[in-house]
Amino acid sequence: MFNVFESVKISSLKENLVKVFRRIFPENKLFIMVISYTVTLSIISILKHWFFLSTAWDLGIFNQSFWSTIHGRFFYYTVEPWFGECFFAAHFSPILIFLVPFYAICPQPETLLVLQSLIIAMGVVPLYHLAKEVINRSFALKLSLVYIINPTIIGANLFDFHVEIFLPITLISLMYFLHKRNFKFYTLFLFLSLSTLEFTAFLTLLIMIYELVINLRRKDEVKRLVPFAVLTLIASVVWLFIAFLVSYSLRVPETREQSILMPITMELFENPGNLLFRLTENMFPKLWYILMMLWPFLFTSLLSPRVTLVGPWLFVAFALNYGPYYAIGYQYALVVIPFFAVASIYGTKRLLSYIGTMNWGKISKLLIVSALTFAIWAVATFQFPLASFDVAYAEKANRIISYLPENASVLTINSFHPHVSSRYEAWVLPLTYNEPYGGYYTGISDIWKAYTPNFLRTKEPDFILWDINKGGIEAYNLNLTIHELLSRVNYGVYAFLDGILLLKKGYMDTPLIYKMTDCTYNYANLTIYSPCQTISDSSSKSGTVLFYNGTENETFFEMRMLFLPKGNYTIKMRIKMSGITNETSNIFMLQVNSGYEYLNFTVFACDVQENVWEEVNLDFEVKDALACVSLNGKSLSTNIAVYIDYINIQAVTQNEGT
């Protein structure tokens, strides 16, 4: 009896699940699109991560936040302590809580990347249903394909993990159920939209205001919209207030008052003319961004006034002059894509009313061709991630990371952070010390400038993981780390492999692995000073050499900021002289700053032959755990021609490890 009852329940459950599935995916082609997109983008996203093309901002942030949550500390993270220790201090995004159970099944960054691809792909479902409702099934399928191969969508998908991924599915669903006047599901997606990001409240209000405006002359529709409008107004305003309270309570005092809208608001009232200038500054990339949003939809979005819903966001983005706000490859495209896509539906409907439904086949084909053309152009124009995959580098980095204990605290760089973020204490230093919004002062730059030295003077991470070959801001931060942290805390070389360095606090033993590829400097990467110049020389190994024939005691070339760990090194310099006389004694001096001391190596006339390439060997030692080494060449004689082919630096003792 009980078996029969159980079988009936199971059968009923299966039938209900099938019904729900068919309501979501009435077309097998739609389901295939979602699955194909999810699988393809998941694979590419994971490969990007495996090849160290993911970053702390934001895959590292979210992986650490989710990992901390399932281990007892609610969305705790250490990437942006100037905001606070909880991610909700930076952004009020309770929708992320729904992902915690899925992350807990497999707590790895890869899980987030798969979930991201699926969530973005699911945005096509409400778009299909809305297009089918407004036009027809055939158009809905074609628009779904256009949407899912859109490079602006794919570009956002391939950039780490971001909470904006929820905006397409929630906002398009919101607009669909508003179109259907389905209050129950409208309410559901209203709160899901609001729970994505705090500023979504402005978007939900805009959607409702637009719906009221276009129906002002239809009294019956206005009456039907009243409960929707009241709910939207109350929910959005209350949600903004709650988001502000939560963020304010979780933030550190220094950043509680910060808002990206504040600089624009002040500029609007104090100097509106200057605000207009900021809006039109860098106009080409801004207009190009709009073009790239419209192109896949065959510009049909322009035929619907709904496209104006993107106006407020674009106004803020253009006024702030923050490049990622109006560039392909960033998550911010997901804010406006829902509006361009929905406007395309209504724009196409208007177009068909002009040209007649008999031309529908031509329009649909043009839509597909436009989308495919844009997709092919985008792949060809923008660097496709597969071209950046460096297998050898990934193997070396993973080998060094394998030496890092699971629960140890670590200070690392932007590209390594996601791989070591499954721990409570995984720190990175700021990627810039400038104001993010050109021309506006928010005070965040001062906070960043104060944070780094304060961190390095007060914290003592168990390990420091760095790629010492990286330049730019990473080299700048490493130099600060040497002067502020390594100068007061004893660290030893735990592992070193071709520039990837792992330092351990208090470590005094032999490194587990110590291997370094020779560093070679020549005309291409040495800084030269006039009258030194580069000339062709067929007898050299480089083909082009440094040539100097000037006065004595003059520095004519320099090599800056080569980071080397503790060890013994040999400099091999290939040099040639001409114009040597019997009275010539000292010709050239190489000055080396090894971090610990300044060393001077002199080349005497008796050491070289006239017009013959000689390789001069010089030894030096780095005595600290890590040093910023520099060297320069100085002439010691007048009218002696000095030719430098290359300077090679190699480690004397190497350890392959196990």
Image (cartoon, rainbow, N blue to C red):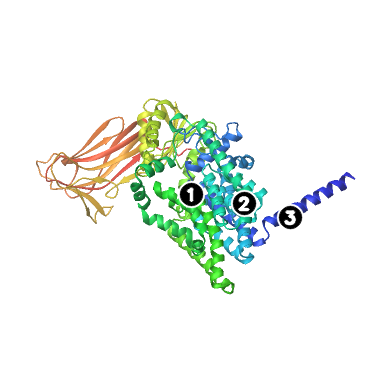
Q: Is residue 579 left or right of residue 44?
A: left
Point out which mark residue 274 bears.
none
**Which amino acid type is shown beneath numbered disc 2?**
Leu
Between 61 and 273, the one lying in front of the other is 273
Point out which mark residue 332 bears.
1
Point out which mark residue 19 bears.
3
Crowd rating for badge 3 (residues with CA inside 10 Å; few <14, some 14–19, many 20+) = few
Q: Is residue 541 left or right of residue 365?
A: left
Q: Nearer the viewer, mark 2 or mark 1?
A: 2
**Which amino acid type is shown beneath numbered disc 1?**
Tyr
- How far is disc 2 from disc 1 in space, using C-alphas? 30 Å
Locate the N terminus by quadrant: top right
Disc 3, SS? helix
Q: Nearer the viewer, mark 3 or mark 2?
A: 2
Q: Is residue 289 left or right of residue 136?
A: left
Task: Give residue 455's position: percent from left, percent from top.
Answer: 42, 29
**Which amino acid type is shown beneath numbered disc 3?**
Lys
The residue sitting at 63% across, 62% down in the picture is 132
The residue sitting at 58% across, 71% down in the picture is 360
Task: Give residue 151's position: percent from left, percent from top.
Answer: 50, 57
Residue assigned mark 2: 225
Pointer 3 with pointer 1, Cβ within 8 A: no
The residue sitting at 74% across, 55% down in the picture is 19
Q: Is residue 162 visible from the viewing direction of this image? A: no
Among the 4 quarters of the image, the one containing residue 571: top left
Disc 2, SS? helix
Task: Give residue 243's position: percent from left, percent from top.
Answer: 54, 37
